[in-house]
């Protein structure tokens, strides 16, 4: 049994990480918006609302984002190529994207 565990350890770790990532992605829209309270400054509440609204939207694309897609700084997209997914973030407000 120990031999089997050692042999498939990398696959098991990858499977657990993939399952965790998928489960957080699936239930991400279930996270309620923040409610910081009445004594929190209005600017902080607006900032938290912007974070919440941007996190809830994850665009999936099959076009290579770097040089092709325009976006705002900090926008995150999911790039799919032949069943492989990768996260990309916009680093400028033009078409420059960085893979995470």
Image (spheres, rainbow, N blue to C red):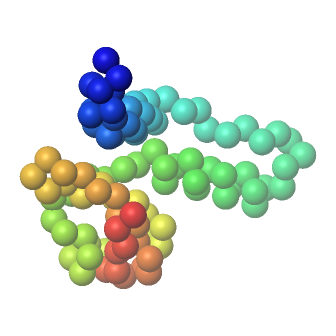
* Residue 55 higher or lower than 95, as above or below: above
Q: Residue at x 24, y 81 (%)?
A: 67
Q: List x then y, in percent, for residue 12.
A: 33, 32
Most distant residue in the right direction: 39
Is residue 45 left or right of 96 when viewed as pictured?
right
Quadrant position of residue 31: top right
Looking at the rendering, in which quadrant would you find the N terminus? top left
Most distant residue in the left direction: 82
Q: List x then y, in percent, for residue 57.
A: 40, 49
Is residue 73 left or right of 10 when viewed as pictured?
right
Q: Residue at x 47, y 73 (%)?
A: 73
Q: Residue at x 44, y 77 (%)?
A: 91
Looking at the rendering, in which quadrant would you find the C terminus? bottom left
Quadrant position of residue 24: top left
Q: Nearer the viewer, residue 18 or 98?
A: 18
* Residue 3 higher or lower than 99, as above or below: above
Is residue 44 left or right of 17 when viewed as pictured?
right
Residue 26 makes an appearance in the image: no
Q: List x then y, in percent, for residue 53.
A: 52, 49
Q: Nearer the viewer, residue 2 or 93?
A: 2
Q: List x then y, in percent, for residue 7.
A: 27, 34
Q: What count of labels does the image hold?
A: 0
Q: Residue at x 36, y 50 (%)?
A: 58
Residue 32 makes an appearance in the image: yes
* Residue 51 higher or lower than 23, as above or below: below
Is residue 55 left or right of 86 when viewed as pictured?
right
């Amino acid at each position: 049994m120990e031999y089997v565990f050692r042999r498939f350890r990398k696959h098991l770790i990858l499977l657990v990480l993939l399952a965790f990532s998928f489960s957080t992605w699936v239930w991400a829209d279930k996270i309620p918006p923040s409610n910081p309270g009445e004594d929190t400054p209005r600017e902080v509440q607006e900032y938290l609302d912007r974070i919440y609204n941007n996190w809830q939207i994850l665009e999936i694309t099959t076009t290579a984002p770097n040089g092709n897609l325009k976006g705002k700084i900090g926008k995150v997209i999911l790039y799919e190529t032949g069943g492989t997914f990768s996260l990309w973030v916009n680093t400028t407000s033009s078409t420059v994207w960085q893979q995470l």
